[in-house]
Amino acid sequence: MRLLLILGVWLALGSTNLQAQIDAFNAKSHVIIKYSPLPMFDLDNTIQFGVEVPLGKSGLTIQEDLGYGHSSFSMWYRETSDVPNKATFKSRTQLRYYYFDRRRVRGYVGGEFLYKKVVYRENEWVGMDCSGFGGCNYFEEKKYKVGRFIGAGHARLGWQFYFPSRMTMDLFTGLGWRKISVRTITPGLENTNITIPDEFWTNANPNTKDFVPSLVLGFHLGIVLGKFDN
């Protein structure tokens, strides 16, 4: 329902300005502001906006996306009362090369670096002065933060569609690898036994690392900026 509402608003905005007939040929030198609907439905949900800037007439562009989300407005925790205090920060940096142009669509290939930081904030009893064999000398109630850090590289393939009303739709897919590490952020809690809320889709226990394949798939809705001749 949310996705249909977003698409409806996007189409309504696009139908309000039909004077300047915009296509891929006259829009490719303009900056595009973009919104990504699908990250709202991610397991680490974010509200994500981006901007694509052309680099001269080379066919190259650079796109930067930034996102922020919190578990309090995640659809995945609606059926449970044990909602973690979790905040997500995300950045995507892309370098694109457009290899073909048509009136209503341009195709591109490119590379992307993704950085994501997920921070859990908790206030619980923590085992202090723990040994490597699992035993702790005592327990103390503490506020603490645990971070899950993701760095990923992807090779991307995509198609960007241009509509006469300044609107664009960017469809993409890509493959790569991602490195995931989890560690305690709060100083002084290195040798402690910390338990954070169970996430069934990922390992969020401190001092763990993973290196796994990564798939990206999605779309952006955009608005072309700048002045056009009628």
Image: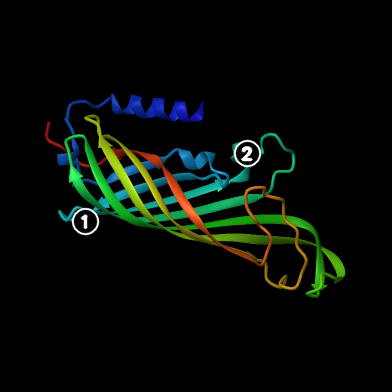
Q: Secondary structure at mark 2?
A: helix
Instruction: Kindly identify the residue that appears in the image at 51 percent across and 49 percent down.
Output: 68
- Judge the density around disc 2: few (<14), some (14-19), many (≥20) Cα neighbours within 10 Å: some
Tell me the kind of residue under disc 2. Trp
Q: Quadrant of the C terminus?
A: top left
Indicate the position of residue 61 as horizontal and vertical percent values: 26, 53
Measured along the vertical axis of the image, is residue 229 above or below residue 98?
Answer: above
Compared across the picture, whether 181 is left or right of 215 comes to: right
Which of the labelled discs sits on residue 14, or is there none?
none
Instruction: Kindly identify the residue that appears in the image at 49 percent across and 59 percent down.
Output: 178
Give the Cα separation between the discs numbered 1 and 2. 39 Å
Indicate the position of residue 46 as horizontal and vertical percent values: 51, 45
Res. 49 visible in picture: yes
Indicate the position of residue 133 as horizontal and vertical percent values: 81, 73
Q: How many callouts does the rendering have?
A: 2
Measured along the vertical axis of the image, is residue 34 above or below residue 193?
Answer: above
Res. 227 visible in picture: no
Indicate the position of residue 26 as horizontal and vertical percent values: 15, 40
- When asked about the image quadrant of residue 14, the answer is top left
Compared across the picture, whether 173 is left or right of 182 comes to: left
Tell me the kind of residue under disc 1. Leu
Compared across the picture, whether 180 is left or right of 130 comes to: left
Residue ID for mark 2: 76
Instruction: Kindly identify the residue that appears in the image at 15 percent across and 53 percent down.
Output: 57
Residue ID for mark 1: 55
Q: Earlier in the sequence, mark 1 or mark 2?
A: 1
